[in-house]
Amino acid sequence: MKWNRNLPIGTRDKLFKEAASAYDMEHLVNRSFHARGYQRIETPVIEFDDVFSAINDVNLYRFFDKKGRLTVLRPDMTSPIGRVISTTGVTPPLKLSYSGKVFRANEELAGERNEMTQAGIEIIGFASIKAEIECITSAIAVLKQLGISDFQIEIGHAAIYQAVIQTLDLQGSDEENFRQVLQNKSLFGIRSFVESHPSAMDDFILALPRLFGSVDTIREAQALTENGVILEALAQMETIIEVVDVPEHLSVDIGLVQELHYYTGAIFRGYADMSAVHFLSGGRYDSLFAEFGEDNWPAVGLALNLDEIVSLKRRTLKEDASDAKTFIHYSLETTHLAEEILAKTPNSSLSFFDQLSESVAFAKKWQFSKIIDVSDHAVREIDPEKEVLR
Protein backbone atom coordinates (compact mmCIF):
# COMPACT_ATOMS: atom_id res chain seq x y z
CA MET A 1 0.00 0.00 0.00
CA LYS A 2 1.35 3.43 -0.92
CA TRP A 3 1.58 5.58 2.21
CA ASN A 4 1.03 8.80 0.25
CA ARG A 5 -2.55 7.77 -0.55
CA ASN A 6 -3.44 7.58 3.14
CA LEU A 7 -3.83 10.37 5.66
CA PRO A 8 -1.52 10.83 8.64
CA ILE A 9 -2.84 9.35 11.88
CA GLY A 10 -5.41 11.55 13.60
CA THR A 11 -6.40 13.54 10.50
CA ARG A 12 -9.38 13.23 8.19
CA ASP A 13 -11.05 14.75 5.15
CA LYS A 14 -14.33 16.64 5.38
CA LEU A 15 -16.56 16.27 2.36
CA PHE A 16 -19.54 18.17 1.02
CA LYS A 17 -22.23 18.71 3.66
CA GLU A 18 -19.90 18.14 6.62
CA ALA A 19 -17.37 20.62 5.19
CA ALA A 20 -20.12 23.17 4.56
CA SER A 21 -21.49 22.68 8.10
CA ALA A 22 -18.04 23.17 9.60
CA TYR A 23 -17.49 26.33 7.55
CA ASP A 24 -20.89 27.78 8.51
CA MET A 25 -20.39 26.90 12.17
CA GLU A 26 -17.00 28.60 12.34
CA HIS A 27 -18.48 31.79 10.90
CA LEU A 28 -21.49 31.69 13.23
CA VAL A 29 -19.23 31.30 16.28
CA ASN A 30 -17.02 34.16 15.13
CA ARG A 31 -20.04 36.40 14.58
CA SER A 32 -21.34 35.53 18.04
CA PHE A 33 -18.07 36.55 19.69
CA HIS A 34 -17.87 39.72 17.58
CA ALA A 35 -21.37 40.67 18.75
CA ARG A 36 -20.12 40.48 22.35
CA GLY A 37 -17.35 42.99 21.64
CA TYR A 38 -14.37 40.73 20.87
CA GLN A 39 -11.71 41.74 18.35
CA ARG A 40 -10.48 39.06 15.97
CA ILE A 41 -6.85 37.96 15.89
CA GLU A 42 -5.09 35.52 13.53
CA THR A 43 -1.68 33.93 14.07
CA PRO A 44 0.48 31.65 11.86
CA VAL A 45 0.01 27.88 11.96
CA ILE A 46 3.81 27.57 12.28
CA GLU A 47 5.60 29.07 15.28
CA PHE A 48 9.05 28.74 16.84
CA ASP A 49 9.27 26.02 19.48
CA ASP A 50 10.06 28.51 22.28
CA VAL A 51 6.56 29.99 22.00
CA PHE A 52 5.18 26.83 23.60
CA SER A 53 7.74 26.39 26.38
CA ALA A 54 4.96 26.70 28.96
CA ILE A 55 3.17 23.62 27.57
CA ASN A 56 6.07 21.31 26.79
CA ASP A 57 3.98 18.48 28.25
CA VAL A 58 1.95 18.40 25.01
CA ASN A 59 3.09 16.21 22.12
CA LEU A 60 4.08 18.64 19.39
CA TYR A 61 4.68 18.33 15.66
CA ARG A 62 8.25 19.61 15.52
CA PHE A 63 10.46 20.22 12.47
CA PHE A 64 13.44 22.34 11.45
CA ASP A 65 13.28 25.26 9.04
CA LYS A 66 15.98 25.88 6.40
CA LYS A 67 18.12 27.72 8.93
CA GLY A 68 18.03 24.81 11.38
CA ARG A 69 15.66 26.51 13.82
CA LEU A 70 13.14 24.32 15.64
CA THR A 71 9.55 25.13 14.69
CA VAL A 72 6.19 23.54 15.52
CA LEU A 73 2.64 23.34 14.26
CA ARG A 74 0.73 25.26 16.94
CA PRO A 75 -0.93 22.94 19.51
CA ASP A 76 -3.09 25.72 20.96
CA MET A 77 -4.03 29.34 20.25
CA THR A 78 -3.36 30.90 23.66
CA SER A 79 0.45 30.81 23.60
CA PRO A 80 0.68 32.48 20.15
CA ILE A 81 -1.58 35.26 21.43
CA GLY A 82 0.85 35.73 24.32
CA ARG A 83 3.65 35.99 21.76
CA VAL A 84 1.67 38.62 19.81
CA ILE A 85 1.20 40.80 22.88
CA SER A 86 4.89 40.57 23.76
CA THR A 87 6.11 41.45 20.25
CA THR A 88 3.61 43.92 18.76
CA GLY A 89 3.18 46.49 21.49
CA VAL A 90 -0.54 45.77 21.87
CA THR A 91 -1.38 46.52 25.49
CA PRO A 92 -4.05 44.84 27.62
CA PRO A 93 -6.79 44.98 28.73
CA LEU A 94 -8.05 43.16 25.61
CA LYS A 95 -10.96 41.00 24.52
CA LEU A 96 -9.80 38.82 21.62
CA SER A 97 -11.44 36.10 19.51
CA TYR A 98 -9.93 33.59 17.08
CA SER A 99 -10.52 30.47 15.04
CA GLY A 100 -8.15 28.14 13.20
CA LYS A 101 -6.37 24.79 13.10
CA VAL A 102 -4.36 23.36 15.99
CA PHE A 103 -2.23 20.20 15.93
CA ARG A 104 -1.23 17.66 18.59
CA ALA A 105 0.76 14.48 17.97
CA ASN A 106 -1.29 12.07 20.10
CA GLU A 107 -0.47 8.41 20.55
CA GLU A 108 -1.19 6.39 17.39
CA LEU A 109 -3.86 4.12 18.90
CA ALA A 110 -5.44 6.71 21.20
CA GLY A 111 -8.26 7.43 18.75
CA GLU A 112 -7.85 11.19 19.21
CA ARG A 113 -7.74 13.80 16.50
CA ASN A 114 -4.32 15.27 15.81
CA GLU A 115 -5.77 18.11 13.73
CA MET A 116 -8.63 20.17 15.14
CA THR A 117 -10.44 23.40 14.34
CA GLN A 118 -10.64 25.61 17.40
CA ALA A 119 -12.53 28.82 18.02
CA GLY A 120 -12.41 30.79 21.20
CA ILE A 121 -11.88 33.95 23.19
CA GLU A 122 -9.14 35.38 25.39
CA ILE A 123 -9.92 38.02 28.04
CA ILE A 124 -6.60 39.60 29.00
CA GLY A 125 -5.87 42.17 31.70
CA PHE A 126 -8.92 41.61 33.91
CA ALA A 127 -8.37 40.12 37.38
CA SER A 128 -12.07 40.17 38.23
CA ILE A 129 -14.07 36.94 38.43
CA LYS A 130 -16.36 38.66 35.91
CA ALA A 131 -13.94 37.38 33.23
CA GLU A 132 -14.57 33.73 34.15
CA ILE A 133 -18.31 34.39 34.24
CA GLU A 134 -18.14 36.04 30.81
CA CYS A 135 -16.32 33.04 29.31
CA ILE A 136 -18.90 30.58 30.60
CA THR A 137 -21.82 32.83 29.66
CA SER A 138 -20.39 33.27 26.15
CA ALA A 139 -19.99 29.50 25.80
CA ILE A 140 -23.60 28.86 26.81
CA ALA A 141 -24.86 31.57 24.44
CA VAL A 142 -22.96 30.27 21.41
CA LEU A 143 -23.89 26.63 22.06
CA LYS A 144 -27.56 27.61 22.15
CA GLN A 145 -27.14 29.56 18.92
CA LEU A 146 -25.67 26.42 17.36
CA GLY A 147 -28.80 24.52 18.35
CA ILE A 148 -27.11 22.42 21.05
CA SER A 149 -29.17 22.24 24.23
CA ASP A 150 -28.08 18.96 25.86
CA PHE A 151 -24.71 19.94 27.34
CA GLN A 152 -22.98 20.29 30.70
CA ILE A 153 -20.12 22.61 31.66
CA GLU A 154 -18.06 21.31 34.57
CA ILE A 155 -16.44 23.91 36.83
CA GLY A 156 -13.20 23.18 38.67
CA HIS A 157 -10.21 25.15 39.96
CA ALA A 158 -6.52 24.69 39.16
CA ALA A 159 -5.48 25.99 42.61
CA ILE A 160 -7.00 22.91 44.26
CA TYR A 161 -4.65 20.55 42.42
CA GLN A 162 -1.71 22.90 42.95
CA ALA A 163 -2.41 23.11 46.70
CA VAL A 164 -2.37 19.32 47.00
CA ILE A 165 0.89 18.76 45.12
CA GLN A 166 2.58 21.62 47.01
CA THR A 167 1.43 20.29 50.39
CA LEU A 168 2.69 16.80 49.50
CA ASP A 169 5.78 18.23 47.75
CA LEU A 170 5.09 16.09 44.67
CA GLN A 171 7.58 16.31 41.81
CA GLY A 172 8.51 14.40 38.68
CA SER A 173 6.99 10.93 38.36
CA ASP A 174 5.12 11.21 41.68
CA GLU A 175 3.27 14.29 40.46
CA GLU A 176 2.55 12.66 37.10
CA ASN A 177 1.21 9.51 38.76
CA PHE A 178 -1.08 11.57 40.97
CA ARG A 179 -2.32 13.55 37.97
CA GLN A 180 -3.12 10.34 36.09
CA VAL A 181 -5.10 8.66 38.88
CA LEU A 182 -7.00 11.90 39.50
CA GLN A 183 -7.85 12.38 35.82
CA ASN A 184 -9.00 8.74 35.66
CA LYS A 185 -11.02 9.18 38.88
CA SER A 186 -9.53 5.93 40.11
CA LEU A 187 -10.62 5.19 43.69
CA PHE A 188 -8.14 2.33 43.94
CA GLY A 189 -5.35 4.49 42.50
CA ILE A 190 -6.05 7.35 44.90
CA ARG A 191 -6.17 4.95 47.85
CA SER A 192 -2.82 3.44 46.88
CA PHE A 193 -1.34 6.90 46.43
CA VAL A 194 -2.50 8.10 49.85
CA GLU A 195 -1.07 4.98 51.50
CA SER A 196 2.36 5.78 50.06
CA HIS A 197 2.05 9.57 50.60
CA PRO A 198 0.22 10.05 53.94
CA SER A 199 -0.59 13.62 55.01
CA ALA A 200 -3.10 15.75 56.90
CA MET A 201 -5.05 16.04 53.63
CA ASP A 202 -5.79 12.29 53.34
CA ASP A 203 -9.58 12.60 53.76
CA PHE A 204 -9.82 15.35 51.13
CA ILE A 205 -7.57 13.55 48.63
CA LEU A 206 -9.38 10.23 49.05
CA ALA A 207 -12.69 11.96 48.26
CA LEU A 208 -11.49 13.74 45.11
CA PRO A 209 -12.52 11.03 42.58
CA ARG A 210 -16.15 11.21 43.77
CA LEU A 211 -16.38 14.98 44.37
CA PHE A 212 -18.29 15.90 41.25
CA GLY A 213 -21.90 16.66 40.43
CA SER A 214 -24.24 19.38 41.72
CA VAL A 215 -23.25 22.56 43.56
CA ASP A 216 -23.80 20.67 46.83
CA THR A 217 -20.48 18.95 46.06
CA ILE A 218 -18.71 22.21 46.93
CA ARG A 219 -20.12 22.19 50.46
CA GLU A 220 -19.08 18.55 50.85
CA ALA A 221 -15.52 19.46 49.79
CA GLN A 222 -15.46 22.45 52.18
CA ALA A 223 -16.21 20.13 55.08
CA LEU A 224 -13.19 17.95 54.25
CA THR A 225 -10.40 20.56 54.36
CA GLU A 226 -9.08 23.54 56.27
CA ASN A 227 -6.59 24.53 53.56
CA GLY A 228 -7.06 28.26 52.92
CA VAL A 229 -6.12 28.11 49.23
CA ILE A 230 -8.58 25.30 48.54
CA LEU A 231 -11.38 27.00 50.50
CA GLU A 232 -10.86 30.23 48.52
CA ALA A 233 -10.95 28.25 45.27
CA LEU A 234 -14.18 26.53 46.29
CA ALA A 235 -15.70 29.91 47.18
CA GLN A 236 -14.84 31.25 43.72
CA MET A 237 -16.45 28.22 42.07
CA GLU A 238 -19.59 28.75 44.13
CA THR A 239 -19.76 32.42 43.12
CA ILE A 240 -19.41 31.61 39.42
CA ILE A 241 -22.22 29.05 39.55
CA GLU A 242 -24.52 31.37 41.51
CA VAL A 243 -23.99 34.33 39.15
CA VAL A 244 -24.24 32.38 35.88
CA ASP A 245 -27.38 30.76 37.33
CA VAL A 246 -28.15 28.07 34.74
CA PRO A 247 -28.13 24.95 36.94
CA GLU A 248 -29.35 22.75 34.09
CA HIS A 249 -26.05 23.36 32.27
CA LEU A 250 -23.52 23.69 35.12
CA SER A 251 -21.93 21.08 37.37
CA VAL A 252 -18.88 20.79 39.63
CA ASP A 253 -15.72 18.67 39.48
CA ILE A 254 -13.45 19.38 42.45
CA GLY A 255 -10.75 17.06 41.05
CA LEU A 256 -10.80 18.51 37.51
CA VAL A 257 -7.30 18.76 36.01
CA GLN A 258 -6.70 20.40 32.63
CA GLU A 259 -4.34 18.86 30.06
CA LEU A 260 -2.31 22.08 29.80
CA HIS A 261 -0.38 23.03 32.93
CA TYR A 262 -0.50 26.83 32.71
CA TYR A 263 -3.91 27.29 34.37
CA THR A 264 -3.95 29.05 37.74
CA GLY A 265 -7.61 29.67 38.64
CA ALA A 266 -11.12 28.52 37.77
CA ILE A 267 -11.18 25.95 34.94
CA PHE A 268 -14.03 24.43 32.95
CA ARG A 269 -14.89 21.74 30.40
CA GLY A 270 -17.98 21.10 28.30
CA TYR A 271 -19.58 17.72 27.54
CA ALA A 272 -22.72 16.37 25.89
CA ASP A 273 -24.47 13.01 26.26
CA MET A 274 -23.75 12.03 22.65
CA SER A 275 -20.07 13.05 22.76
CA ALA A 276 -17.30 10.77 24.04
CA VAL A 277 -14.87 13.65 24.62
CA HIS A 278 -15.13 17.23 25.87
CA PHE A 279 -15.72 19.84 23.17
CA LEU A 280 -15.12 22.93 25.32
CA SER A 281 -12.35 23.87 27.72
CA GLY A 282 -10.78 26.90 29.30
CA GLY A 283 -9.95 28.74 32.47
CA ARG A 284 -7.80 31.37 34.13
CA TYR A 285 -4.06 31.52 33.42
CA ASP A 286 -2.51 34.47 35.25
CA SER A 287 1.16 33.52 34.86
CA LEU A 288 1.51 32.65 31.16
CA PHE A 289 2.58 36.07 29.91
CA ALA A 290 5.65 36.04 32.16
CA GLU A 291 6.97 33.31 29.82
CA PHE A 292 7.28 36.03 27.15
CA GLY A 293 9.03 38.55 29.37
CA GLU A 294 5.81 40.47 29.96
CA ASP A 295 4.08 41.57 33.13
CA ASN A 296 1.90 38.88 34.67
CA TRP A 297 -1.28 39.98 32.95
CA PRO A 298 -4.32 38.21 34.41
CA ALA A 299 -6.17 36.30 31.70
CA VAL A 300 -9.02 33.87 31.08
CA GLY A 301 -9.62 31.85 27.91
CA LEU A 302 -12.26 29.66 26.31
CA ALA A 303 -11.71 27.19 23.43
CA LEU A 304 -14.35 25.28 21.44
CA ASN A 305 -13.47 22.15 19.46
CA LEU A 306 -15.59 22.87 16.38
CA ASP A 307 -14.91 19.48 14.76
CA GLU A 308 -16.40 17.67 17.74
CA ILE A 309 -19.39 20.02 17.79
CA VAL A 310 -20.03 19.39 14.07
CA SER A 311 -19.94 15.63 14.72
CA LEU A 312 -22.24 16.07 17.71
CA LYS A 313 -24.79 17.97 15.64
CA ARG A 314 -24.72 15.36 12.89
CA ARG A 315 -25.46 12.61 15.44
CA THR A 316 -28.25 14.41 17.28
CA LEU A 317 -30.10 16.71 14.88
CA LYS A 318 -32.58 15.63 12.24
CA GLU A 319 -32.31 17.05 8.75
CA ASP A 320 -34.30 20.27 8.46
CA ALA A 321 -36.89 20.76 5.74
CA SER A 322 -34.93 23.82 4.61
CA ASP A 323 -32.14 21.43 3.53
CA ALA A 324 -34.27 20.30 0.54
CA LYS A 325 -32.27 20.81 -2.67
CA THR A 326 -33.42 21.85 -6.13
CA PHE A 327 -31.62 20.96 -9.39
CA ILE A 328 -32.22 23.27 -12.36
CA HIS A 329 -32.01 21.68 -15.83
CA TYR A 330 -31.74 24.14 -18.72
CA SER A 331 -30.50 24.60 -22.27
CA LEU A 332 -28.05 27.18 -23.57
CA GLU A 333 -31.00 29.19 -24.90
CA THR A 334 -32.62 29.34 -21.43
CA THR A 335 -29.50 30.21 -19.43
CA HIS A 336 -30.86 33.57 -18.28
CA LEU A 337 -34.17 32.03 -17.19
CA ALA A 338 -32.24 29.39 -15.21
CA GLU A 339 -30.17 32.10 -13.52
CA GLU A 340 -33.36 33.94 -12.50
CA ILE A 341 -34.80 30.80 -10.92
CA LEU A 342 -31.45 30.06 -9.20
CA ALA A 343 -31.44 33.55 -7.64
CA LYS A 344 -34.88 33.17 -6.07
CA THR A 345 -34.79 29.46 -5.13
CA PRO A 346 -33.03 28.64 -1.82
CA ASN A 347 -30.56 25.76 -1.80
CA SER A 348 -30.60 25.28 -5.57
CA SER A 349 -27.91 24.62 -8.16
CA LEU A 350 -27.62 24.50 -11.93
CA SER A 351 -27.27 21.29 -13.92
CA PHE A 352 -24.53 21.24 -16.54
CA PHE A 353 -25.84 18.09 -18.24
CA ASP A 354 -27.22 18.36 -21.75
CA GLN A 355 -29.76 15.54 -21.39
CA LEU A 356 -32.63 15.60 -18.89
CA SER A 357 -32.08 11.91 -18.14
CA GLU A 358 -28.55 12.72 -16.98
CA SER A 359 -29.84 15.47 -14.68
CA VAL A 360 -32.41 13.06 -13.23
CA ALA A 361 -29.79 10.39 -12.56
CA PHE A 362 -27.51 12.94 -10.85
CA ALA A 363 -30.40 14.35 -8.78
CA LYS A 364 -31.28 10.84 -7.55
CA LYS A 365 -27.67 10.08 -6.61
CA TRP A 366 -27.23 13.29 -4.62
CA GLN A 367 -30.74 13.32 -3.12
CA PHE A 368 -32.19 16.45 -4.69
CA SER A 369 -35.86 16.77 -3.73
CA LYS A 370 -36.92 18.18 -7.08
CA ILE A 371 -35.79 19.21 -10.56
CA ILE A 372 -36.94 22.37 -12.30
CA ASP A 373 -36.71 21.87 -16.06
CA VAL A 374 -36.63 25.07 -18.14
CA SER A 375 -34.86 23.62 -21.17
CA ASP A 376 -37.88 24.32 -23.43
CA HIS A 377 -38.56 27.82 -21.98
CA ALA A 378 -41.52 26.49 -19.96
CA VAL A 379 -41.02 25.87 -16.24
CA ARG A 380 -41.71 22.26 -15.23
CA GLU A 381 -41.17 20.64 -11.81
CA ILE A 382 -40.04 17.00 -11.71
CA ASP A 383 -39.76 14.55 -8.82
CA PRO A 384 -36.50 12.72 -9.58
CA GLU A 385 -37.69 9.60 -7.75
CA LYS A 386 -40.75 9.30 -10.00
CA GLU A 387 -39.18 10.29 -13.31
CA VAL A 388 -38.64 7.39 -15.72
CA LEU A 389 -35.16 7.51 -17.22
CA ARG A 390 -35.01 7.15 -21.00
Image (cartoon, rainbow, N blue to C red):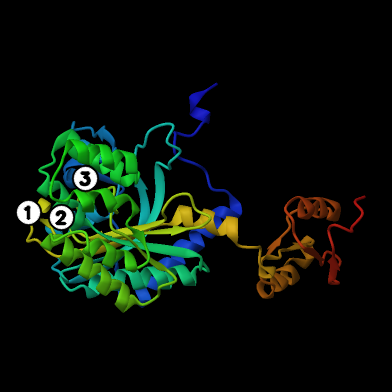
**Circle 1 residues within 10 Å: few <14, some 14–19, many ≥20:** few
Instruction: Identify the residue at horizontal 30%, vertical 39% (top origin).
Output: 189
Judge whether residue 29 can be spotted in this image: yes
Q: Which residue is mark 1?
A: 293
Q: Quadrant of the N terminus?
A: top right
Horizontal relation, residue 12 to residue 155: left or right: right
Of residues 207 and 316, the one nearer the viewer is 207
Instruction: Identify the residue at horizontal 15%, vertical 70% (top origin).
Output: 127
Three-letter amino acid code of the residue under disc 2 = Leu
Of residues 77 and 243, the one nearer the viewer is 243
The numbered dot on residue 55 is 3
Above or below: residue 52 compared with residue 306: above
- Report x, y in % for residue 55: 21, 45
Q: Which residue is mark 2?
A: 288
Q: Quadrant of residue 316?
A: bottom right
Three-letter amino acid code of the residue under disc 1 = Gly
Q: Which element is circle 1 on?
A: loop
- Looking at the image, is mark 3 or mark 2 earlier in the sequence? 3
Three-letter amino acid code of the residue under disc 3 = Ile
